[in-house]
Structures are given as structure tokens and as C-alpha cells.
Amino acid sequence: MKLGRLRHAAAYEAIRQCQAENGWGICWLCKQAGIARASYYQWLKRGVPEGEKENEVIAQLIQEYDERFHHILGYRRMTDWINRLNHTHYSRNRIHRLMKGLNLHSVIRCKKAKYRRATPEATSENILHRDFLAERPNQKWATDVTEFKWYEGLVAKKLYLSAILDLYDRSIVAYVVSGRNDNKLVFDTFEQAIRKNPEARPLLHSDRGFQYTSKAFQIKLSKQGMEQSMSRVGHCIDNGPVEGFWGILKAEMYSLNKFSNSDELRSAIDQYVHFYNYERFQERFGVRTPMEVRAAALATKFPEQFPIAENKRIQKYKAKFAA
């Protein structure tokens, strides 16, 4: 693989190999490649530049992290993680070029959305109103349930994951895995979150799933002194951060593995949630993990603020089509 930036390096290497393996003449090979013979001999006698030696070290790190983290790192996150874990300052362009040379890239997300209609007992207004910025931990929580499948032969089995995400540090506050998508699944998740954060009184945002619109769940919120917010019908983006987490989890863990039983899938979910909270660096937080950010915020009266960058594509669309 070409790690340096030397012009015609690949051609020089091909000439060297053809001459060594087949005994073909250097003059003829250089003529076929359109390269001056003197240039080839100059390349042959040169030493390996320091930059190229460093590229070989970086390439080894890239291959190691790509394998270690199950091919989930694109060149941006690969750059952040290499720099964070090795105290370096490599540029994204350099890492991108080396990953292209190694033919490494992050996994591609394939997402299928399914919806079902339900008649709610009681609904709440969309109080959150897509304001996903929180100033401190336990100010705004978002929650949802997602589905996983695994197979026993040709028979599909299902597991359901309920999670609550804190919008300040994007950490998973609580989660529960169950074979049934019922009230107990959501209630257990909520109670786990309250046990871990007994003084929390956040705004809790969800979609209009039957568990969240049930009067029993709303009584639990009222007892805790919490306000409820719900997405509008057909607007999944109103709960964007949790939907984003589902996409990350499925792209970086679920889609990369095949599971033969529920225990394997449960274990993989447990491991990934721990990885996400404690090991998965996020650029928005200065290449720190959600739990690093959470711990720092809980230890001070004035938590650090992390503004959400504007989506340039959305801004461009609004400028073009908004009235």
C-alpha cells in the first residue's frame, strides 16, 4: 500500500517487483510505465522518509482500532480516537488518505422504520418542541422503545429495548431489555432511572406509544413531579436524539453480528450500552464520553455548555423553500 506522497511510487514498486520476479529489463519497464530510468534508480536508492515511517505507525493504529471497535469508525472519529488515546494531533485529511489506502471505512447504516396506530388514553403537548439543548444533567430526558430480532432456525423471535436518554450529556440514564413490549417494560425503565436519580425532576419527552399515554404512567410522572412532553403524530424527528441513538446502536452493534439466542443479544446490548456511556468518545463533547461529561457537570454549580451545531443542509433547505 502507498503510505507516502511520492509521485509514481506505485509504478516504481511495480517495476521493482516485475524485474525481481520475471527478470524483465529495467529500460523496457520504465519505458512502458512512462518513467525516466534515472528517476527509478534514484527512488531505488533513497531511504524511507520519516513521514512515511510515521504513516506506517498510523496505519497500524488504524487497523488495530478498526478491528477493535468492529469497523464503526469513519475517518473523522478515527482521527479523534487516535489523537485522544495516543496524545497526538494528526489531521483528518491524513487519516482519511491512509484509510482509503487501507480500504477501510465505517459500516453503512441501513434503517427500516415501522409504525403502528394506537388509540391513546391521554396525550400531552409537544412541550420540548425539538429544543434538544439542555443546560445541565437531569433537565430534559427523552425515551422510547425499539425492537430487535433474532432467529431460532427460520422462526423470528423479538426482544425490546426501552431506554431513557439525558439530553445534556446524551448518556443512557436507564434501560431495560424484555421479550414483551408492554407497560412493565417502560415502567421498569422509568423506575430504574428514578432510583439512580432520586432528586431528578426533568421534562420527559416520548412519542405517543400506548405505554406513555396510559394513565398509570402519567400518575408515576405526577408523583415524581415531572412534566410530560410528546411528539406530534407522524413526526419522529420530534424525538430525534433517541432515534439517533437507536440508529447508532444498530449500526455499530446489532447489524454487525448474528445472534442465535436471546442471551447473546441481551449480553451484546449490555456491553454496547456500557461502551456507549463510558468508552465511546463524542466530538461535540471535546472527544469525551457521555459519562465523563456527566461526572464533570454533576461536580460543579455551573456545568459546561455544549451548543448544538446548526444543520447546514436544513438551513439551506429553509432558505430555499421557506416562505
Image: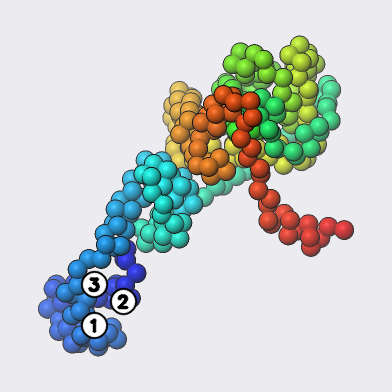
Query: What residue is pinned by disc 2?
Result: 8
Judge from the rendering whether residue 201 lies leftward or rightward of residue 85; answer left or right.
right
Mark 1 or 3, nearer chain start: 3
Query: What residue is pinned by disc 3?
Result: 13
Residue 255 placement (x, y as % from top left):
50, 40
Residue 226 placement (x, y as % from top left):
76, 19
Whether residue 136 is visible to the viewer of this picture, yes or no, is yes
Mark 3 or 2, nearer chain start: 2
Quadrant housing the N terminus: bottom left
Marks 3 and 2, how far apart in space?
9 Å
In the image, what residue occupies the spot 18% across and 87% down? Answer: 27
Q: Is residue 103 above or below residue 175?
A: below
What's the amino acid at mark 3?
Glu
Query: What residue is pinned by disc 1?
Result: 39
- Of circles 1 and 3, which is in front? 1
In the image, what residue occupies the spot 48% across and 30% down? Answer: 278
Of 202 and 19, nearer the camera is 202
